[in-house]
Image (cartoon, rainbow, N blue to C red):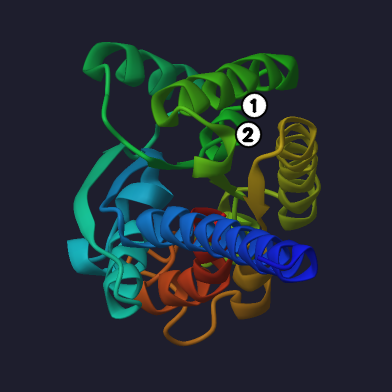
Amino acid sequence: MNNKVLIFLVFICALGACSSDEQSITHSESEDKSEILTKSIKYLALGDSYTIGEGVQDSKRWPNQLVEEFESNDLSVDKLDIIAKTGWRTSDLINAIETNNPKDFNLISLQIGVNNQFSNQDFETFVEEFDLLIQKSTQISGQNNRVFVVSIPDYGVTPFGNSWGNPEQIASEIDMYNNHISQKCSEVGIAFINITDISRSLGDSEGALAPDNLHPSGFQYGLWVEKILPVVLEMISE
């Protein structure tokens, strides 16, 4: 065979092999991402009265509404568990996690701290215990990008908050707590979602609060979910 023809054939074969390798790599990356998007979500929500949805039906809790949105986006949700109780501070949640020893979850949310502020607990205690909760959350999920934290709403704008204390002081202290939460999340690479502005914008307007005039209504929780959803969808597609 002519040497020029032989060299040409070898060159064509080499190009074909490279193209095949590139297609294989692209296909593999696509499969990896597709696997994450179609993998069943096992969601654990950690928190206090806001997470448990004090004063609203179970279906109107924000974690439950978030799961509904997952399903609307063709994501499979294998389970939703909630470890939360009205009145819990960070120490109570730590104890509950240690007692329940939750396992096999690939998405964790954390929203805690309002009762630390409400009970005038030493702020440094909150800092220490919140940081421990971040550590425990990432241990349960196995990775930082499967944990997200939701800010503390401002209850000072509610009728209860107005009658109980000084709304300006409550707002200032809530901001102090949320600032630490935000900074800690940024430090460790965890998503932080600020819903405090929603609570302040709605205040005690019609439909914003549960019958106790303190906790959010299902409607307000729905607005939280509108802000939470795109962040979480991006997380689970990475």
| Residue at (75% x, 53% y) in the render | 171
Examine the rendering and report whether any part of residue 147 can be seen.
no
- Label 2 is placed on what type of residue? Gln
The residue where tag 1 is placed is: 120
| Residue at (27% x, 24% y) in the render | 102
91 above or below 199? above
| Residue at (80% x, 42% y) in the render | 179
The residue where tag 2 is placed is: 117
Split into 4 quadrants, where in the image is the C terminus? bottom right
Horizontal side of 209 relative to 79 (left or right) equals right
The residue nearer to you, when weighing 57 against 79, is: 79
Q: Residue furthest bottom?
A: 206
Dot 1, crowdedness within 10 Å: few (<14), some or many (≥20)?
A: few
Split into 4 quadrants, where in the image is the N terminus? bottom right
Say which element carries label 2.
helix
**In contact (CB < 8 Å): disc 1 and disc 2:** yes
215 above or below 225? above
- Label 1 is placed on what type of residue? Asn
Residue 177 position within the rendered picture, expressed as x and y whole percent measured from the top left: 72, 38
Q: Residue furthest front?
A: 1
Q: Which mark is residue 28?
A: none
| Residue at (27% x, 25% y) in the render | 103
